[in-house]
Image (cartoon, helix red, strand yellow):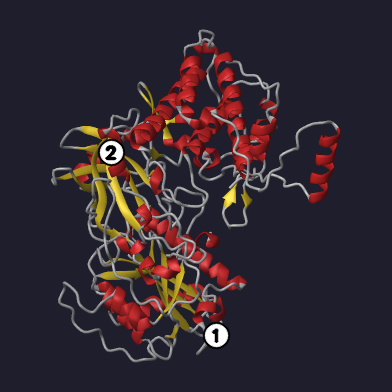
Amino acid sequence: MASSMEQLFLGPMPVEQFLDEFLPKESSVTRPGAPVVGDNYFAHVIQDEIAGNEMSEIYMKAITRKKLIPGFKMVNTSFDNDKDMESDHHLKPHPSMYRGDLDLSEAVTQFYELELHSELKALDTDDAFVDPLQGQDRSDSTFESQTIAGRASRNELIHYVTEWFARQHRRHAFTIFLFGTYIRFIRWDHAGAIVSEKFDFRSDCSFLVQFLWRFSHLDNVGRGRDPFVRRATPQEAEIAYKELEEWKPIADRPVVVFTIPSEDGEDREFLAWGCLSEPRSLTGRCTRIYPVYEVATEKKYLLKDGWRAHSLAPEASILCKLRDNGVRYIPIYVCGGDVINGVTKTDLYVTIEEENEGWQDKIKGESRDSVTAEKANEDADGESHISIPKLDGSWKCGKSWQRVVQRFLHRFVSDIIGKPLKTFTSSKHLLLVVSHAFIAAKEAYELCRIIHRDISANNILITHDGGILNDWDMAKEEADIKSSRRHERTDDMESFVLVILYHILRYLPHNKTDQTSRILESVFTRRERLPNGQYGGGESRRFLFLDNEYIGNDFELSSPPLQLWIKTAIMVVKEWIQAERAKSRPREVPTELEIMVKERAAAKKGLPRPVFPATTEPTPPNGPFILDTHEQMAMYFEFCLEETDWPAPEDDKPHDILSTPAKRAHDDESQDIDESTSSKRSRLSSSGSWD
């Protein structure tokens, strides 16, 4: 887990700057002065051979005795797991800070109610970070500790905070990291984390006292909570239990109320009771999907909540554009968009020059400082134009910050709650649902020049009359895709083939069932680290398409029309891969000796003098190719759906071939389907390698 945040920790920020920028003295509340506390007041917290739990008790009592957190209470949660975690990992954080009136009689550890996290370690060597030496060049310093103890501490910090963010709607959060005789403060958001310099709190605890006192006087927004999400009243909760029973969460979750503005500016409220999947990472999009109920309209909707990268247009704007241009089989936008002041701050400490190092994929070529934290003023293209000044980050170590991405909280409601693709009812139903999603991608490109860029099974949903293509948050207009290895519409078309092949192999009868686990593992799950640090699908998919590896030429389904479609589709992708490889394969320029020999041979035979290439520029392959447009693939869908020899429904019911424990190598449904079928994540380059 620590590797997922590599190079996302910015530090060490001077402690005074940390306090002044993130916990300013000014407040909407009239704030009295902090209690007078001696500089060495906390000296007794760390003693020789003191146990971790005993350290927690002394730490909490010292804080409580001086009344440093009015309105809150510090509780020792290191003995109690949070019983409401969805995963099998049971977390017992060190002292947790809650509201003073919170009832803890039934559960002591409650991530949903956590206000401030403390992590206590007994030794100085447990530090997860390394401050540079006096006079050391910070650009050449590594801030993240690479010792075993340091990496373990950092991993534990990330683990706790990831669960915390998953259980609450937070814009940011704070941690007090105590190790040996030192303390660091950490501010987390969805772009990364800002870490303060370490200070010896035993000899001078004034910074700790100021932090606790200022923190306890912040309002909910200052402490990081989302002001547009609140806990439901008992009456609202009862309504949600009734109306959203179909999506009752596995683990206990509170009912919450989202406030979202409509297109006419009026606020609308939606009840939600647990999301369909909680994000498992702290940074990135961190998407959550909620079935929601609106009391005012007595209707159910789908709410999507996530953190979009600054280089991506708001998904709500994309859906509006698709809708206005008549694109079919997409979610119908209802309301919402970028949330007011929902923006990360970690990225503001990275200069334009630092962030542009290797940064090539921007909105219309603009740099990041053209994007702002204010409510997005969207132009006709649905893009945001904001301007936030960069902040002083001269204190940070390192010099490569391409991964620190500014993100905006994007939340909107659509009117379709679909079912997962894996719930298809027959082979024909599978092809019909995916064909509708394909039509959506086709029309989005033809009518709007928009490329989805994230075709996967999790983004194709079943509706009452077929299917829709969901999740347009990665979509871009073709002209705005500027990276050297651009994602093209043909990559999306390849992904549709992979989606269907995956579901054929896993859920429908075929003559390779005894090899299903191995095939899926080799083709869809196995990933290789590439020279650029990203992960790709390896050589297996190249062998699959080019050589019929794994499934073989004798691959047979019990559904003739679907077999015709998949074999044709694989041949189409093979043709495209071969054409792409030919574009980049250099021509061989003959040597002088080869030219002389061939000229003499031609002269002896009375033939014209041969012509030789004077350049190594690749020879463009002869076209056209089927994947040059969507048209012929759409015809293949239509042709196969019109076939008359589809199996009878009673003989064509899908079942999970990997359902038995011994064969189930793909037990994480959301991971194996989503990440394994998208060409965005694992694509075949023109040289034949996957990237």
Query: In the visual, does 258 lie left or right of 544?
Result: left
Q: Quadrant of residue 463?
A: top left
- The disc labelled 1 sits on which kind of residue? Asp
Q: Nearer the viewer, residue 682 or 588?
A: 588
Q: Read off the residue under disc 1.
A: 48
Q: Nearer the viewer, residue 432 or 97?
A: 432
On the image, the x and y values in percent for residue 366 come to 35, 58
Q: Nearer the viewer, residue 647 or 686?
A: 686
Instruction: Please tell me which of labels 2 and 1 falls first in the chain.
Output: 1
Q: Give above or below for 329 relative to 580.
A: above
For the image, the number of numbered tags is 2
Q: Read off the residue under disc 2.
A: 321
Q: Give above or below for 207 relative to 503.
A: below
Residue 659 visible in image:
no
- The disc labelled 2 sits on which kind of residue? Lys
Q: Quadrant of residue 329?
A: top left
